Amino acid sequence: MAAEPLSNGAAYQSVPESYVLPGDKRPGSSPSSAAAIPVVDLGGDDPDRIVKQIMGAGREFGFFQVINHGVPGQVMGEMMSSAEEFFGLPTEEKMVLYSTDSKKLPRFHTSIGNDQEKLLYWRDCLKLGCYPLEQFRHQWPQKPARLRAALEAYTTAVRAVALRLLRLTAAGLGLDEGHFEGELTAGPVIMNVNHYVPCPEPSLTMGLAPHCDPNVVTVLADNGVRGLQARQRGSGGGWVDVEPLPGALVVNFGHQMEVVSNGALRGGEHRVVTNARAARTSLATFVMPAMGCAVAAAPGMVPDGEAPRYRAFTYQEFMGAYTAAIGDRDAVLARFQNKD
Ligand code: OGA
Ligand code: NI
């Protein structure tokens, strides 16, 4: 049975049964950490400093925030307010785009959005194809009226930031700066416009379960309402709040960065907890490989005489395993691990 979207104008007084997670899956069942996600200033003229900071954050969290990234505040603001306006539309107008077919674009759905799920997550999502613009522009929602122009400006600018970050990351790994250009980033750019309505009992449920994005890099903006948490690497493995920073973009590496860097950088595991007071809206922009892309550790990343940590695969093959494992970070990676 397809689930009803949460953004229907209702103010929830209690958490409906289908959203109540078993104890071991609730937010409080794993430790939190007081560490902070690094903030990298992309301004100035010291690329070495920027590269060093990205590498440090990439090793420990696979997560960082960037400021002075060059995306105009007005472009970010227009995109965020059109997104919030979308979720405020009357339910019937959003339902025009509703589907439980995960291949459909654009699509409005709730939770993960398939017909099989029994336990639901506390989020609604508008998933959009964004780039190349010519491929997707004509299918963008008609309402709200300013969404199309906002998407065009935002997608173009944020993709450029992502590609710049990938050049800096490649340099930090000692690779050719263009290593991630070409097939590794030739897939469509997809955006999850996520919306988490206020939840009366955040300890019982979750906006999104722990996962690592399957792609190369994700760039996220939020409306200033907290909820996103990143997992710190290492024995503690605690959850760290990603503090909303006005005007910043949150960057997280996906699984493919971990594979290409042969484990030097981490695909950032994250989850979203719900908020009792305010609605969180986030824009997650995914830069991905082409489906047919052959993904493998970059030659320079594997020590002489050793096998790469992960065997080579096509992105399509990886996505099959990712969907089957419903995003469980270690289960997905284990499918591609070299044993020796
Ligand atoms: C996602 C995601 C985080 C957020 O869409 O994959 O992790 O804060 N979103 O909404
Ligand atoms: Ni994610």
Image (cartoon, helix red, strand yellow):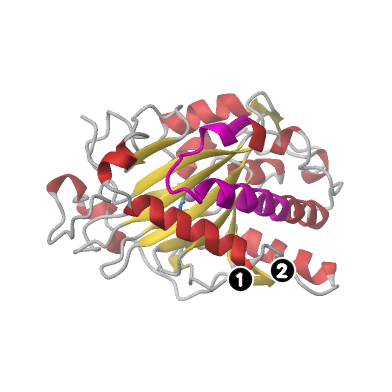
Q: Quadrant of residue 45?
A: bottom right
Residue at the image point whose x is 62% and y is 72% from the top: 39
Judged by its main secondary structure, the magenta piece is helix
Q: Position of residue 229 (x, y in %)?
A: 44, 62
Please identify the quarter of the rendering in which residue 238 is found: bottom left
Asked if residue 110 is positioned above or below residue 270 in the image, the reply reads above
Q: Does the residue labelled 2 lie within 8 Å of ligand 1?
A: no
Question: For mark 2, what is the residue?
Answer: 53
Q: Is residue 153 magenta?
A: yes
Residue type indicated by callout 2: Gln
The answer to which of 327 and 141 lies nearer the viewer is 141
Which residues make up the magenta segment? 135-162
Residue type for callout 1: Pro
Q: What element carries label 1?
A: loop
Left or right of 14, for residue 236 = right
Say which mark, if any, is on residue 38. Answer: 1
Q: State the quadrant of the C terminus.
A: top right
Give the residue displayed 61% in from the left and 71% down from the top.
38
Q: Is residue 232 visible?
A: yes
Is residue 267 visible in the rendered image? The answer is no
Image vertical order of residue 311 relative to residue 280, above or below = above
Q: Where is residue 190 in the image (x, y as percent from the top left)?
A: 56, 40
- Element on which disc 2 rests: helix
165 or 149: which is nearer to us? 149
Q: Where is residue 278 in the image (x, y as percent from the top left)?
A: 31, 68
Query: Label 1: how many residues lie within 10 Å, few (<14), some (14-19) or many (20+)?
Result: some
Q: Check whether the beta carbons of the residues at disc 1 and disc 2 lie within 8 A of each other.
A: yes
Q: Would you place residue 339 above or below residue 12 in this image?
A: above
